[in-house]
């Protein structure tokens, strides 16, 4: 219950931060990405602030034996770059640049019933579903191929 309450409070603080910083306003985000036009550097300060807080918190967490509201730390150990990561990053960046939203700010903007946020969120959910469907189809194909070759669990 404590972890759930902590997650909820963190989400509320995060949503207020997104709203106050202007990240829920696509024109502000697009202005930040317009380096050759009328560039608005204010989101850079938001990012620097977020990175600074994360840096301090992460360094502090390395000194802790266990987290405060979880059984163990869940720190990713993978550090390689693959085609899926690079393609996903590129799609994320293109979506952010064209739509003016990241997933978090889009969801926060849904509370204001903003049509662009609803369209972006629907497209984002559709993309997530399509990726999940594609991944399941590929895994099924690999499983079927392994079974035909006699190397799968069914053989």
Image (tube, rainbow, N blue to C red):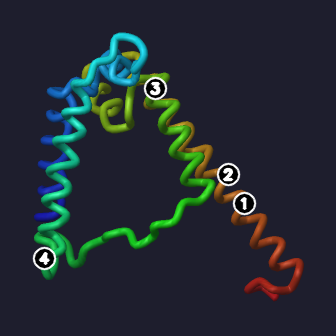
57 sits to left or right of 148: left
Q: What secondary structure is found at the residue carrying circle 2?
A: helix
The residue that mark 2 highlights is 134
* Residue positioned 35% across, 30% down in the render: 106
Q: Which residue is mark 3?
A: 97
Q: Which mark is residue 44?
A: none
Q: Residues within 10 Å of mark 2 (few under 14, many from 20)?
A: few
**Extreme-front residue of the structure:** 36
| First-in-chain label (4 vs 1) | 4
Where's residue 139, x and y in %? 69, 65
Residue 17: quadrant of the picture: top left
Q: Can residue 75 be seen here?
A: yes
Give the numbered dot on residue 63.
4
56 up-or-down from 36: above or below: below
Residue at mark 1 to residue at mark 3: CA–CA distance: 30 Å
Q: Which label's residue is closer to the chain start, 1 or 3?
A: 3
Q: CA distance from mark 4 to mark 3?
A: 38 Å
Kindly tell me whether residue 113 is visible in this rendering.
Answer: no
Nearer the observer, 48 or 92: 48
Q: Are marks 2 and 1 in contact (CB under 8 Å)?
A: yes
Per the image, the residue denoted by label 1 is: 138
Q: Nearer the viewer, mark 4 or mark 1?
A: 4
N-terminal of the pair, mark 3 or mark 2, is 3
- Position of residue 129 relative to residue 34, above or below, is below
Disc 2 versus disc 4: distance between alpha carbons? 41 Å
**Picture quarter with the N terminus:** bottom left
Q: Earlier in the sequence, mark 4 or mark 3?
A: 4
Q: Between marks 4 and 1, how big is the CA–CA gap? A: 41 Å
- Indicate the secondary structure of the residue bearing disc 3: helix
- Label 4 SS: loop
Quarter of the figure with the C terminus: bottom right
């Amino acid at each position: 219950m404590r972890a759930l309450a902590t997650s909820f409070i963190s989400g509320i603080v995060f949503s207020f931060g997104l709203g106050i910083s202007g990240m829920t306003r696509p024109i502000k985000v697009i202005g930040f990405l317009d380096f050759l036009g009328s560039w608005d550097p204010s989101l850079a300060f938001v990012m620097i602030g977020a990175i600074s807080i994360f840096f301090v918190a992460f360094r502090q967490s390395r000194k802790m034996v266990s987290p405060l509201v979880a059984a163990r730390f869940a720190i990713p150990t993978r550090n390689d770059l693959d085609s899926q990561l690079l393609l996903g990053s590129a799609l994320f960046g293109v979506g952010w640049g064209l739509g003016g939203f990241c997933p978090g700010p889009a969801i926060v903007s849904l509370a204001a019933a903003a049509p662009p946020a609803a369209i972006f969120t629907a497209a984002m959910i559709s993309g997530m579903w399509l990726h999940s469907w594609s991944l399941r189809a590929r895994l099924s194909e690999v499983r079927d191929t392994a079974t035909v070759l006699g190397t799968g669990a069914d053989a």
